[in-house]
Image (cartoon, rainbow, N blue to C red):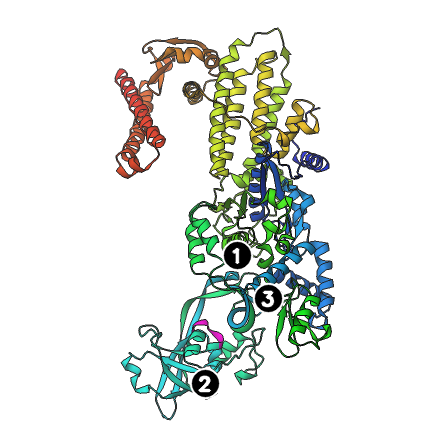
Amino acid sequence: MSLASKYDPKDTEAKWYSYWLENKLFSSKVDPEKEPYTIVIPPPNVTGVLHMGHMLNNTIQDVLIRRARMQGKNACWVPGTDHASIATEAKVVNMLKDQGIDKKSLTREEFLNHAWEWKEKYGGIILEQLKKLGASCDWDRTAFTMDPGLSKAVIDVFVDLYEKGKIYRGIRMVNWDPQGKTALSDDEVITKEVASKLYYIHYKIEGSENEHLTIATTRPETIMADVAICINPNDPRFSHLKGKKALVPLINRSIPIIEDEYVDIEFGTGCLKVTPAHDINDYELGIKHKLEVIDILNDDGTLNEKAQILVGEDRFVARKMIAKKLKEVDQLEKIEDYTSNVGHSERTDAVIEPKLSLQWFLKMDEITKPAFSSVMEDVIQLHPPKFKNMYRVWMENVRDWCISRQLWWGHQIPAYHLPNGEFVVAKSKEEALKKAQELDSTLTLDDLTQDEDVLDTWFSSWLWPISVFDPEVFATGKPNEELKYYYPTNDLVTAPEILFFWVARMIVAGYEYMGEKPFKNVYLTGIVRDKLGRKMSKSLGNSPDPLELIAQYGADGVRTGMLFSSPAGNDLPYDDKLVEQGRNFANKIWNAFRLVKGWEVDSNLDGAANSSSIHWFENRFNQALAEINDHFEKFRISDALMVTYKLVWGDFCSWYLEMIKPEYQHPIDQTTHDKTLELFEDVLRLLHPFMPFISEELWHQIKERSVEESLILAEWPVQRDFDEAIIKEAAQVFEVISQVRNLRASKGMSPKEALDLTIKAKDEKLYSRFESVLNKLGNLSSLSFGDSVENAMSFVVKSDECFVPMGDSINVEEEKANIQKELDYTRGFLNSVLKKLSNERFVSGAPEQVVANEKKKQADAEAKIKALEESLAKLG
């Protein structure tokens, strides 16, 4: 195969992705002889297009799945999409509006026809985009939460939980989204700090000419729903008002003044208005004191007839108008700036209204217990573990889950209402009729009306790790072969913001229906942020288009760029320089291979001179491999990449290839060349999970290979023992070479000018073993050992002093200044190490190896200081 002079990601990516797909290299089938490794994708919304968060999340999943595949495991990554009731319905409503069609003019069936058409046209976009990233999903397994089988599973589970007494229907205060016109669960509400106003309103005391109470509220538009004023029974300021009544401003409705210790005497004016229909705390107070409930808001957030005034006005418009009217009748004392926490819909961003509504709920007190203990006891591990506390707080304060939504797109609740107001729950209308006829034998199918609401989208996705393998298990109770083999899955990669929305609920469902955890590890990614620390979003316009990034920098460049600074659970401060670094890394690898491929090989040459270089890199590779494997085991994916990056760019390209490179227009020996290609193959194995495209391309450039020999199926490198001593020796030699190069540069000398080097060494054999490397990379005319040399520049590596004769050109004062500068730096470094070692908490708490490393740094620094001081003394 010919090798282009420049790496072209576009052609390479298209070629190899097609190759992998055509040869079914992503597919997985039950194989009892192999250990399964399973990941289920967090199903993106069908409304979605690829954004930076998806890029990060799916890159991590692909890295994990590709490495597992190379480890010989039966790797299965299940893709799919979520029907996203609220978001999709909003998209379809807007599409219809653009066509001049009002949803209200359509029947449910007509609307759903439009919704399915929209889904078929746009719903697969994001999965196609993931292919550009290199995602090695088993695409034959692609699932959708409203596929027939998965839909049946949702209905089976609803009926089962209802029959177990865990689902109930009742009037409760819920979070209402006036824009989406649906109830939301607590988890779908995002609280934001909002700059608001505090209105101080006078409520006249009934029967009194001048007396009034002042109430501070952020929501004057709800005063028409007031049913009481509450004071603390222990507050002497208002004791004379016990048993009296007040008048609601503007409408002059009489309301009682009640007492309850719930009122904080110190807060605000010390008394509050009670509006049970529009505040959760007031609702609880209303139940306790048996107060009337007056709901003055329509489902869309406008005022209804019960408000008596401003009927039809939007709630926020009404707020300003009420304030103006109160001022006109002299019942508005003042308005203050105020910062309040306001709930917003996660989907539409509309301000949430607390609303009394008849909804369906799942009891969460008992069903969540196994899910709580499994995470607390690390049966399921969260990475990083700091999220355990967030999980604990949520689970300890869990509320019943409002599972009904006032929408048409989704799984319609399988409850069937009878003419007399009763209902039955069944898997089909025919089954419902049988149950209904037990109550009234005269009923027919036409007498049954299915509940209008659909289920919360999460009520389908909480079954995802089970239903994608066996949607029938909820009905049969007997898992099929696929479910037995692939469940529990291994690792889940997702965002912390859906830890409770989705992760906790999947764990609940897993224990409820499988008696087993759904996954072993949960890797929680951070948020991708811009340079100013803002979350990347379309609305801010601060997010690059991922597909444009891939087109510009290549998928491998973008993948590595996203991972360079993305440790688990920590936010990723994105910068184009990261993906640029990724692209440069791909180019470096490409050019390294071109260098090796371009060498002429002579089988008659002796390669003994390169044996120490080969021996060193083999050991360095195995040392890096041990670190990489350890990072993977601990889910430090970013760290695993950085070790790989430094090994490939620094150790392999910058050192090893330079060490063994033949002189210009000279051939290389066969042994070294063959060994170098073997080492290159090992490097490509390490790179493949991170950079699948360029690694597969070069793997096949090394030699012709069959489909079965493709890199995607190749064996992950086997961990072997390594000699740490030779790695440290080589590092010392490299430091000497770097210092010689720096000396040349500082003196403006040509790199081609050969230099003599004398080393006052503790261990001369160390340098002798790498003499050919020193001479070649340092461009030395001679290497000798001994004491100080006259008229020489010197530098210290570890405790060894190195001298380069400079004839009469040496500037003694300049040399003394340079040594003093290095001495000051080394002393400062030693002080920082000593400070750390004098900290008892560090010494007793840190791992033994970490403390040993610090002590080694101390010894090296002390030896270097001694040598530098001797050098300075010799110069006078």
Q: Nearer the viewer, mark 3 or mark 2?
A: 3
Residue at image position (48%, 50%) is 532
| Label 2 Cα crowd, 10 Å radius (few <14 / some 14-19 / many 20+) | few
Q: Is residue 873 left or right of residue 106?
A: left
Q: Where does the image place residue 73, in percent across and percent down from the top left?
A: 59, 34
Q: Residue 405 shows which numbered tag?
A: 3
**Kind of residue sitting beneath label 2:** Glu
Q: Is residue 219 left or right of residue 121?
A: left
> Which of the pair 874/491 is nearer the observer?
491
Q: Is residue 526 above or below residue 615?
A: below
Q: Is residue 753 visible?
A: no
Q: Nearer the viewer, mark 2 or mark 1?
A: 1
What distance separates the C-alpha of mark 1 from that of mark 3?
15 Å
Residue at image position (49%, 32%) is 629
**Kind of residue sitting beneath label 1:** Phe
Q: Where does the image place residue 267, in percent across and percent down from the top left?
A: 34, 72
What distance separates the C-alpha of mark 2 from that of mark 1?
47 Å
Query: In what element is the residue under mark 3?
Result: strand
Disc 1: which residue: 501
Q: Residue 408 shows which numbered tag?
A: none
Query: In what element is the residue under mark 1?
Result: helix
- The main secondary structure of the magenta stretch is helix
Q: Earlier in the sequence, mark 1 or mark 3?
A: 3
* Residues under numbered marks 2 and 1 in contact, where contact means CB atoms less than 8 Å apart: no
Q: Which range is magenta?
A: 277-281
Q: Earlier in the sequence, mark 3 or mark 2?
A: 2
* Residues under numbered marks 1 and 3 in contact, where contact means CB atoms less than 8 Å apart: no
> Which of the pair 813/322 is nearer the observer?
322
Q: Where does the image place residue 661, in percent across and percent down from the top left?
A: 56, 16
